[in-house]
Amino acid sequence: MTIANDAGAATPGDPGPAAAPDAARPVAGGGVLRTPAVWVPAALLLGIVASAVFAPLLSSASPEFSDIGNTLAGASSGHPLGGDGVGRDVLSRLLHGGRQSMLGALVAVTVATAVGGPTGLFAGFFRGWFDAVAGWVSNLLMAIPGILVLLVVIVAFGNNIYTAMVVFGMLLAPNVFRLVRAAVTGVREELYIDAARVSGLRDLRILRRHVLPVVIAPVIIQAAQLFGIGIIVQAGLEFLGLGDTRSASWGSMLNDAFTNIYLAPRLLVWPSVAIVVTVVLASLMASGVRDAVQGRGRSRSVPRRRAAVESLRAVLPADDELLRVEGLEVAYGDREVVHGISFGLRRGEVLGIVGETGSGKSQTAFSILGLLPSTATLRAQGLTFDGTDLLACDERELNALRGRRIGYIPQEPMTNLDPAFTIGSQLAEPMRRHLGLDRTAARQRAAALLTRVGIRDPGRVLDSYPHELSGGMAQRVLIAGAVSCEPEMLIADEPTTALDVTVQAEVLDVMRSLQEERSMAVVIVTHDLGVVADICDRVLVMRDGHVVETGPVAEVFARPQAQFTQDLLKSTLVGAPLRRPVQTVREGASW
Amino acid sequence: MLRFFAHRIGEAVVLVVGVTLLTFAVMSALSGTVARQIVGQTASSEAVQQKASQLGLDDPFWVRYLDWIGGALHGDLGTSWFSGETVNSLLGGKVPITFSLVVGAILVSGLVSIVFGVTAAVRGGWVDRVLQIVAVAGFAFPSFVLGLLLALVLAVHWRLLPAFGYVPLGQSFVGWSASLLLPVGALAVQVVAATSQQVRGSMVDVLQSDFIRTLRSRGISPASLYLRHGLRSAAPPALTVLGLQTIGLIGGTVVVEKVFGLLGLGTAIVSAATQGDVPIVMGVVTIMVLIIVVINLLLDIAYAWLNPKVRAA
């Protein structure tokens, strides 16, 4: 009775099924133990365990002997922490109580691992009906409210806390099952590619040699967390007065303290501290091991929101220039991907930026829009749009430009629409914000835009969700969105790459006619020289973050100067009938 | 959509039958001694025998369970073995207490988790780190220990809030809220620890997705970007975690009710189980599983509302 069990429950520091295969990298056990984040909590935890094991040596008083004179007494030389509600020595009960509390938790963890581990191993490795049945049982067990079952069990079976913890271990087993199963499934996929089976290794050997090493680290991490949960649940049961209340445990101490909460509130402190500290140490140790095994490099912490921006020196743009980029550098950490490129764009001009994958052309486009990922650093001597220094703009000022005066067309249509909103609402939102249109006006305008980009049934598309559209339709919707507020400049990042060849031609056609109709300036990023030939006035050839050549398209194509441009032209144009369909469609178009 | 809910309701039925059957089976292990306890230690063995057959303990296990479930389907949860009162009247007044606790804790932790998770994902840096530490700490505090400490400091020591007892909603809204504030807070902490981490994680993933970048390129406001678009896509996995947390919350209420002296279903089941009053135990278990089922169905509806693909299916 959960919504989608596959998504899994994320407790803080849950190793998580997805993370499990990463643990495959062998890490020497000694290496993990040498990490302070592991050995410090481990040593402290060991200290708590030792204090429980050697309790009789640390306290001479009996944990169960009632001394009426010591009832609710304060600290004294004989009783360093005083006496409890029936005159028993608090220190002694605290030390001895650790035995029952930690032993109970250990019982639960052992049962959970012993039941869930092998089941997960088999289910993940052999699949089939066993996997199906085990998965079903595991889902059912996870939906059972544990405390209710334990309550009944403990009463029915002689008030013994350890029986309850065995049952609790069974209820925890699905956690281990799912973790191990996910890890094994991951390895299993690799193993088929691997030669292990081909070379005749038997299943048991594969399990031992390839699967076990992957599973052990996540299971240890999880065991530490389940240990904490076991301590908490057991203490809860004992606090309710279940189990043998005479024998010392942290939970029964809480029960006694609760009865005397008005008379001696300090009695609450010791068992609470013991429980919380033990649980915290266990989960700290778990996350320490996880970090040591998986490496901190891919830490999940989130960096600052905006890319760091640095203006080196303002450069004044020429007269009719709409956009001026001067000395633009983009870096990720120490790795610079764009090395100080410069170019300008006049009003109504179409500039193509071409280059191979990884040449820095998309990074350049995102720099202009202020949409670099937050891990990037941007430096430039100048980045101005119509006299506005984009580097000096904050997010609010950028938002006034983006969508309104600068439009953006992304590469991959299917992932660039919000899956949770209708096309109509996604198209309307920027228009309502930038142009102040009301709901009806925005919808009318959106419908007109859709018709303009060649969608025949705008009413239906407006009410559709992105997953109901084809790639070509989605790209038309994105183009409509980019031009909805009549921007003066359009930035298109490989707008046709993800589309079928015939659809490419149509989409390019829409862009070209929109550009001509509104005389927009366009920066079009592409690796397709056919697109450049088709639509651009000027071209900028990039390689490895440098500009290798720039000039009017006809000139560059006729007399390429750089060797790289020559190679690029050869590889695309020689004997390539690729652009034919475009020509055909264009002849058929009406201008 | 219909298939989605048919599937969910099927799962709910399996859960209710499974849990009640399990409880019934375990409780029937007690049946041998219960009749003796009811009639008293000094009663003759004939009297014990008579009581046992009166309670139907002579019948085979399956007959007794089917009897019980037949009654339950008609809304009749039976009669207490000890007091002779009907389970419905005994538990009727207790349901609102436990229900307020669970629903209150779910609502509070859902809201707080969204605030924490979104803030951590959007702000990043030290804000993120502090919130992660808070989550780990919250995870280590069992709700009843936290409840005890809260009661001790705020109610016993400073006398800011009532430490014990429940004020019905019909009687006084302020009194009702005040009586629930501490227990709901104590219950919510662990749920927030788990759920806020999930909100944060899926929010971080969503914020890196292409459509968020495209939305930013359209110049929409940050509030709409993060709360309308980002959160809507990040919410479904968080709802799943919240649904799983409901199950743990039910256990939490049993303990927290004792801490704050709330005479709800939790206190009822503890005393009934200790006595061996099977009808009451069965009644509480059934109602609690139904609370879980209802909350999860509501979360399913929210899930379907957030996810157009589920709605269409």
Image (spheres, coloured by chain):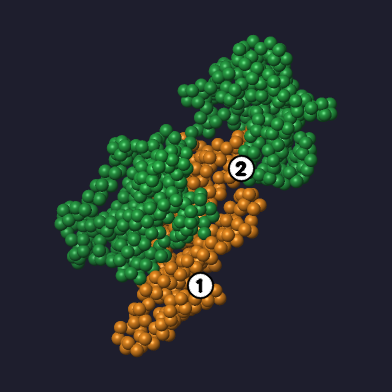
Chain colours: A green, B orange
Q: Which of marks 2 and 1 is in front?
A: 2
Q: Do the residues labelled 2 and 1 touch (CB within 8 Å)?
A: no
Q: Mark 2 lies on which chain?
A: B
Residue beneath the point at 32% across and 55% down: A110
Quadrant containing the C terminus of chain A in the rendered view:
top right
Task: Tell me which corner region of the image, top left, top right, bottom left or bottom right, holds residue A159.
Answer: bottom left
Residue A81 pos. (x, y %): 22, 55
Please, what secondary structure does the residue beneath circle 2 have? helix
Q: Where is residue A547 in the image (x, y as percent from the top left)?
A: 60, 16
Q: What element carries label 1?
A: helix
Residue at position x 50%, y 68% in the image: B17
Q: In this view, does B22 lie above or below B178?
A: below
- Mark seen at residue B92: 1
Residue A86 percent across, percent down from the top left? 24, 66
- Looking at the picture, tell me which residue is in the foreground, B181 or B237: B237
Instruction: Please tell me which residue is depicted at 65% across the width and 17% down the height of the picture.
Output: A570
Whole-percent x, y for residue B148 in the image: 37, 58
Residue at position x 56%, y 48% from top?
B235
Disc 1 residue type (three-letter): Gly
- Badge 2 amino acid: His
State which chain disc 1 sits on.
Answer: B
In the picture, residue A510 is in which quadrant? top right
A221 versus A28 height, above or below? below
Where B163 sits versus A4, above or below? below
- Camera sees residue B57: yes
Looking at the image, the residue that sits furthest to the right is A590
Q: Which of marks 2 and 1 is nearer the N terminus?
A: 1
Query: Is residue A385 something one can see in this rendering?
Result: no
The tag on residue B229 is: 2
Answer few, some or many: residues within 10 Å of disc 2's Cα (few below 14, many 20 plus, some between 14 and 19).
many
Circle 1 packing at 10 Å, graded few (<14), some (14-19), many (20+), is: few
Answer with left or right where residue A473 lies relative to residue A130: right
